[in-house]
Image (tube, rainbow, N blue to C red):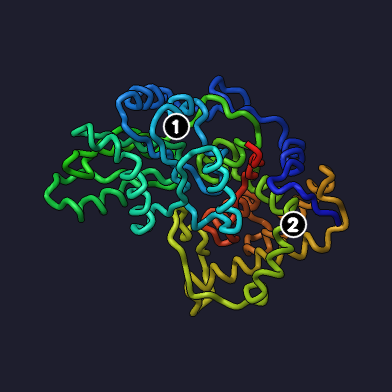
Amino acid sequence: MSIGRSSSGSNAKAAVKKALGEMDFNSSGGAINWFPGHMAAATRAIRDRLKVSDLVIEVRDSRIPLSSVNADLQPHLSKKRRVIALNKKDLANPNIMHKWTHYFESRNQDCLPINAHSKSSVKKLLDLVELKLKEAISREPTLLVMVVGVPNVGKSALINSIHQIASSRFPVQEKIKRATVGPLPGVTQDIAGFKIAHHPSIYVLDTPGVLVPSIPDIETGLKLALAGSVKDSVVGEERIAQYLLAVLNTRGTPLHWKHSNNRRMEGIRYEREEKHDYNLKDLRPKKKPPNVSDVLYIEDMVTEVQRALYFSLSEFDGNVENENDLECLIEQQFEELQKALKIPHKASEARIMVSKKFLTLFRTGKLGPFILDDVPEVDTAS
């Protein structure tokens, strides 16, 4: 068996393209029409409001710091005071996260990894925003802060946390409607504002998540789909799961599980569960073994999934750098995952059920923290 060295999986990209055929992510339709009409209107509204904003909080997904960029808005954002908030840091690999912050700092871009559900984390973001606005505060009685980002990066969760913090600081301000939060991309379809501070008055505008009309390449589109920024139904759960398996295999991740998670691989159970946007209730079986809690059942499921992928990769006698070999391995792993997830063989939609549960484990961080994008090389000489 041979493991490729590429961290984000150029081989994964090639293998998935071979297995799935070409896919187009563009507004004109093509193989995949994923750019809803409301996004075009929302993009125009965001551009109009950017003209009068004093600072922009650009929310990105920590797992895809570059792939979760809306390239169409970048020319507008680059002219504004901006803070890049890398949300969902609890799902991102902490061993690589500091390299990303160094990268953004080298480009003179303010960047802060955050967890939008953590008030202490959001307070640090607000402190940075206040610092960035310090000069403008001395001149303007009213300031406008915009929150922008592609779908499902956690903008609404961030807005709600900011509102809770602002309400504790300024309890006399008028009540506002909370932002709508949901696991599906594009839930927030309006642009609404509320006051977060007095003297000077600082208003925060929430905006709908908008993608660009055309995604530059298939791998970027698949990363967005894997992170949940493109609806599963648009790309297909099987395609996304195949891509995830390709990434895990080319990185050799299942082999690392054996060394870094020995206790879990040996079946030790953990009484801990994190709260994330994707609902772990989706993993609950219709019939669960008696006297087993949901948390323990899920942890056992994770153990079985990791074992299945570990053994299938460690015993694989092909070369994951070879597209055909990798495709065969992924097919074998689907069968092993079906057994690990205890999905009946006769189920007519077994592969879709396997894909959905496998993706839920990834998206809730149960398979470990990941960063799918590669850190660009920084020119230290400049």
Task: Look at the numbered discs 2 and 1 and tell me whether their residues touch, using CB distance below 8 Å.
Answer: no
Residue depicted at x 60% and y 36%: 221
- In the rendered structure, find residue 252 and report the number of the disc placed on it: 2
Badge 1 amino acid: Val
Judged from this view, the residue extending furthest toward the right is 317
Residue drawn at (63%, 44%), measured in percent from left and top? 375
Q: Residue at x 50, y 27 (%)?
A: 35
Q: What percent of the width, then of the height, locates residue 109?
A: 48, 39
Q: In this orientation, which residue lies closer to the viewer: 109 or 270?
A: 109
Whether residue 92 is visible, yes or no, is yes
In which quadrant of the rendered image does the C terminus lie? top right
In the displayed structure, 231 sits above or below 312; it is above
Q: Horizontal and vertical percent for residue 192?
A: 27, 35
The residue carrying mark 1 is 210
| Front-lying residue, 264 or 330 | 264
Q: Residues within 10 Å of mark 1 (few under 14, many from 20)?
A: many
